[in-house]
Amino acid sequence: MLFRDLARQTGAGSSGLATAAIASVIAIASTLEPSVATLTSSLSNAPISRLTTPDVTPQNHKTGEIFIQPQFDEAEDFHEGLAKVKIGSKYGYIYKTGKIVIQQQFDDAANFSEGLAKVKIGNLWGYIDKMGNTVIKPQFNSAEDFADGLALVADGYIDKTGRVVVKPQFDENTEEYSKAAYNFSEGLALIQSGDFRVNPNAGYNAGYIDKTGKVVIPQQFENGGNFSEGLAVILSDSKWGYIDKTGTIAIKPQFDNADNFSEGLAAVKIGEKWGYVDKIGNIAIKPQFDQGRKFSEGLAAADTSGGSCVAILECSFGYIDKTGKMVIKPKFTRAEDFSEGLAKVMIGGGRDGAAGFLPGKWGYIDKTGKLLIEAQFDEAGDFSEGLAKVKIGSKWGYIKK
């Protein structure tokens, strides 16, 4: 994401890798008929009936074929072996076979992260494990995903037992004053505050705390982002630069916009063009693109539309390597990061005088630019754990590589 309005971001939790214990559960589940897990919620003692869905797994599938039939009103990528789906007004979770493992019963929910998922019952948030058991009962007015072992809730930061380990001291919003805190990343969390009485333009003071709640980098910056690959983007004197984990300036604030580091490079904007810098601040790829995405699996999507990238349908995206060479020609309306060897791209769409913008269709390319999965989907997600969510008409399903 670009840091144009970090003061209003809600924080982004990073998904943890599946542990050996989780892998064991999935391995057992692959040999047994999965049953719907029983949610041991203190709010309800009613038994949850066993649910199954038809076995929609093709025996011999081809790349891009429907693997789980479109049947969900909402769907998310697979994380740690499970995916959040919505049927009607309730959320639950499915296995990679499409079978429901945790019944649709939540008013809101999120992906699993570090073994737990936040779920909402009524107006309160709690956390469940992968069997659907309530680990932390619904009690919070707000909650975020677990990251670095902690989760930000209305009561501060909690550990995986629900114990508050950092007291609430950074969350306060009025017409005159604002405080905010975000998820931990690489051991530190961004905090911000601003006094509108002093600065009507909301001069947010950004700093960082450690996992004890101690302010280890004073609130001295106008804005900031999460740490990534040891550096965090910050705003100082209306220019973006980077600091290390001691708060020392690592790359002088000099950019008009900037993104997180990924695979050793970060997209930065100078004037109206985007380029890339390395971790010591050297220009690795000179600014020349109208948009520049982060590097993923060695490639980054870049727009060369010449400034005509209005909304989503006046763009011309291709992919560059780390030398800045355009290795996949610009020909896509939209283009996203590579994941598991494939990237989703939009083909077609455009401006219509009567209808306005008309969306194209999503498909998937490999790293040579070959369209491996035909552009046919109304919406689509990245490949995650071998599957990608796709929308056909009003319903979501999944395809397999």
Image (cartoon, rainbow, N blue to C red):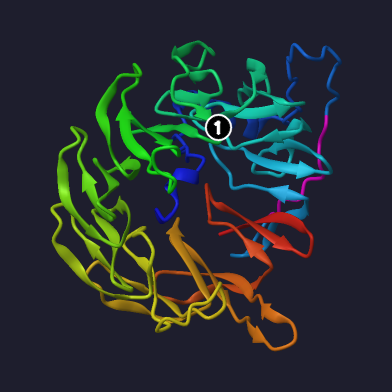
User: As rendered, which of 229 and 370 lies closer to the eye?
Assistant: 229
Per the image, is 233 magenta? Answer: no
Label 1 environment density (alpha carbons within 10 Å; few <14, some 14–19, many ≥20): few
Question: Is most of the magenta stretch helix, strand or loop?
Answer: loop
The answer to whether residue 187 is visible is no
- Specify whether 390 is left or right of 173: right
Question: Is residue 130 placed above or below 2 in the rendered structure?
Answer: above
- The residues colored magenta run 51-59
Residue sitting nearer the eye, 126 or 85: 126
Q: Quadrant of residue 339?
A: bottom left
The amino acid beneath tag 1 is Thr
Of residues 316 and 66, which is closer to you in this image? 316
- x, y (%) of residue 283? 17, 65
Can residue 284 be seen in the rendering of this structure? yes
Residue at 82% x, 40% y: name it: 89
In the rendered image, which residue does mark 1 sit on?
174
- Where does the image place residue 52, in percent across and percent down from the top left? 81, 36
**In the orientation shown, which residue stands out farthest toward the bottom?**
353
Relative horizontal placement of residue 107, taking residue 341 as reference (left or right): right
Rendering quarter of residue 323: bottom left
Q: Nearer the viewer, residue 5 or 345?
A: 5
Quadrant of the drawing holding the C terminus: bottom right
In this rendering, would 257 be left or right of 75?
Answer: left
Q: Secondary structure at mark 1?
A: loop
Q: As drawn, is 19 to the left or to the right of 81? A: left
Question: As displayed, is residue 15 above or below residue 284?
Answer: above
The quadrant of the rendering that contains the N terminus is bottom left
Residue plotted at (76% across, 33% down): 107
Queried whether the magenta region covers residue 58, the answer comes back as yes
